[in-house]
Amino acid sequence: MAQNGDPIHDRKSMQLLESPDGGMRDTVLVSDACGANDLSAGLVWVAPGATIHEDSHPFDEVYYVVRGTADLILDGVPHVMRQGDVVHIPSPITHRVHNPSDQVFEIFWCIGGSMARLPGVWEELSKWPTVNPDEGWHLS
């Protein structure tokens, strides 16, 4: 993340992390590390056939579907998300994403709070390996 006070930075300069099961890639683009105190945002890619972890948090969350189609499961109820959709997930609803298709699913996510208020998230992400943003399934 940009830490020099520059408000503009290149996504490729951010760490791209991959979940231990290989089904999800995540990059945190905006967080308290770059000076954002009340906002966090990033990109997530879900591999074909993969389901990402379920979570909930004390902030509302918004997804913008960049590409693909996948199921958003909110408190056990599935909803189909498609490219171009804007999705609001109210706090503290549990949610997860399942990509049943054979295409990569990509979202931009934004939460109305600091990542510092989600210490478990940083602890988990610190265990994920860093991968090359210019290579891999998320680009297909």
Image (cartoon, rainbow, N blue to C red):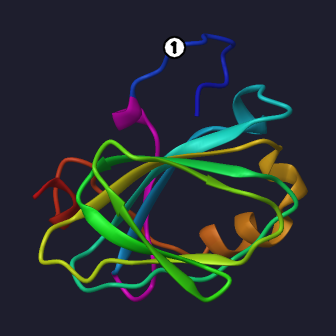
Residue 137: image quadrant is bottom left
Where, quadrant-wise, is the C terminus in this rendering? bottom left
> Is residue 82 something that shows in the picture?
yes
Q: Is residue 66 left or right of residue 86?
A: left
Residue under pointer 1 = 8
Q: Is residue 83 left or right of residue 92?
A: left
Q: Residue at x 63, y 75 (%)?
A: 95
> Is residue 28 something that shows in the picture?
no
Residue type beneath disc 1? Ile
SS class, disc 1: loop
Q: Indicate whether 4 appears above or below 56.
A: above
Q: Indicate whether 13 appears above or below 21.
A: above
The one nearer the camera, 111 or 3, is: 111
Q: Is residue 130 left or right of residue 67?
A: right
Where, quadrant-wise, is the N terminus in this rendering? top right
Q: Residue at x 61, y 68 (%)?
A: 125
Residue 24 in magenta stretch? no
The one nearer the camera, 131 or 29, is: 29
Residue 47: image location, x then y, percent:
26, 74
Residue 132: image quadrant is bottom left
Disc count in the image?
Answer: 1
The magenta-colored residue range is: 11-22
The one nearer the camera, 2 or 25, is: 25
